[in-house]
Image (cartoon, grey):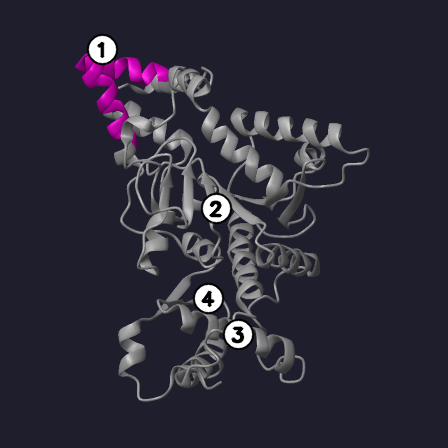
Amino acid sequence: RSKPLASLFLTNEIMALNPLDDGTIINDLLHDIIYPFAYNTGNIDVSVNIENHLAYYAAQYQRWRWIEHEYPTQNKYPHSFASLRPDLHETGKKLASLKNADVLSLFFGAGVSMNANLPSWQGLLNKLATFIEMNENELHNLSSFNILDQPTIIEKRFVAKYGDDKGKSMFKQQIADAVQTPYFALTHALLVGLNLNEVVTTNYECLYERAFESVNEKQIRTLPQDLGKKDQERMPWILKFHGTTTYPDSIILTREDYIKYNANSSAMMGVLESLLITKHLLFIGFSLTDDHLFDACQAIKDLLDASYSTNERKMGSVLMLKENKMFKEQWQSMFDIVSMQNEDEPGDTSEAARKLEIFIDYLGMQITKKNCKFLLKEEYDI
């Protein structure tokens, strides 16, 4: 991160032990501790982690009320979202209105999990190659191959050493082990706070699911693995587009995996195409380079072009760290392209990633600010 992060955990046990009502705790916490601390230290970010849903809604409401009504006349401390450009504020409000109209869904990629210290795609391949004892010269030569052929070559080494079935099984298990970590990142928690019911990811690991279950008594439904389970029709779901570490054999990485996937993925492609037609997909941490996604987007664009004389509907929004005008030129007919940093703005990628966290937090506030379930509770007299 471009700035250190200090985290304050407001657990249910802490709330229960405090003699004050929960609304007073939240109000005092924000005004007397968090804002002064962040302002006076200057070079540090502070996150407040809340387990209780009502307390979360109350905190977001308090923060929104302070920014909208008190901050303009009592601006002793800069508010949490002062570093975001005005157009990002407007984008956040637009996306929040889509969520509140129940037409916003999420698609996230590997970029979301980088802050959890998971390896990049190249880092993953290096881990696999090291495990199978490829030397430095072989690693160098490996990089000259196509991105689908590189893992294919590594898998062949596993097969040569351990046999066909055991080698392929060990290869997939090593992939699963390489992306396992006990802790989810701040971004996962912020995304869960958006309370979206339909989520798609190309990630193998289960950090979003872990973040979801940390604040929900029920589990999130994982597709396609949980399709056969009973009594899950109304549960929020996550579609693991390229497999999951829970079932290592489902992981898609080699050329053979992709060929088999193309032959058997019509149902999952149907789910993605349905979201592109009926929802507004919010892409985060994903570069749109996946061929399956491109095929689905092109199919829906062709359908829309054929159905309307003038098609101005965008299928979603893509949140990028740094502005890329050529990327925008390629995709702007299908998606709204939103950059955390414009080309002429100072700051490196780590600062842009920090702004993405702040933007998701802002979106969460805009979504939950009118959720007033806490107002009829005596403990939230705010």
Front-most of residues 144 and 71: 71
In the picture, which quadrant includes the N terminus?
Answer: bottom left
Label located before the other in sequence (1 or 4): 4
Give the farthest residue toward the front.
231
Which callout, 4 or 3, points to the residue nearer the camera?
Answer: 3
Task: Kindly identify the amino acid type of the residue bearing the numbered disc 4.
Answer: Ile
Residue denoted by label 2: 198
Which callout, 2 or 4, points to the residue nearer the camera?
Answer: 2
For residue 40, above or below residue 136: below
- Where are the magenta residues, as a range? 152-175
Q: CA distance from mark 2 to mark 3?
A: 25 Å
Residue 5: % across, % down: 41, 62
Q: CA distance from mark 3 to mark 1?
A: 59 Å
Q: Which mark is residue 119?
A: none
Considering the numbered disc 3 on the image, is that residue within a helix, a strand or a loop? helix
Front-most of residues 231 and 91: 231
Which callout, 3 or 1, points to the residue nearer the camera?
Answer: 3
Residue 73: % across, % down: 67, 84
Task: Kindly identify the amino acid type of the residue bearing the numbered disc 2.
Answer: Glu
Label located before the other in sequence (3 or 1): 3
* Residue 162 is covered by the magenta coloring: yes
Q: CA distance from mark 1 to mark 4?
A: 51 Å
Q: Are marks 2 and 1 in contact (CB under 8 Å)?
A: no
Q: Are marks 2 and 3 in contact (CB under 8 Å)?
A: no
Residue denoted by label 1: 160
Question: In this view of the protein, can residue 140 be seen by the observer?
Answer: no
Considering the numbered disc 2 on the image, is that residue within a helix, a strand or a loop? strand
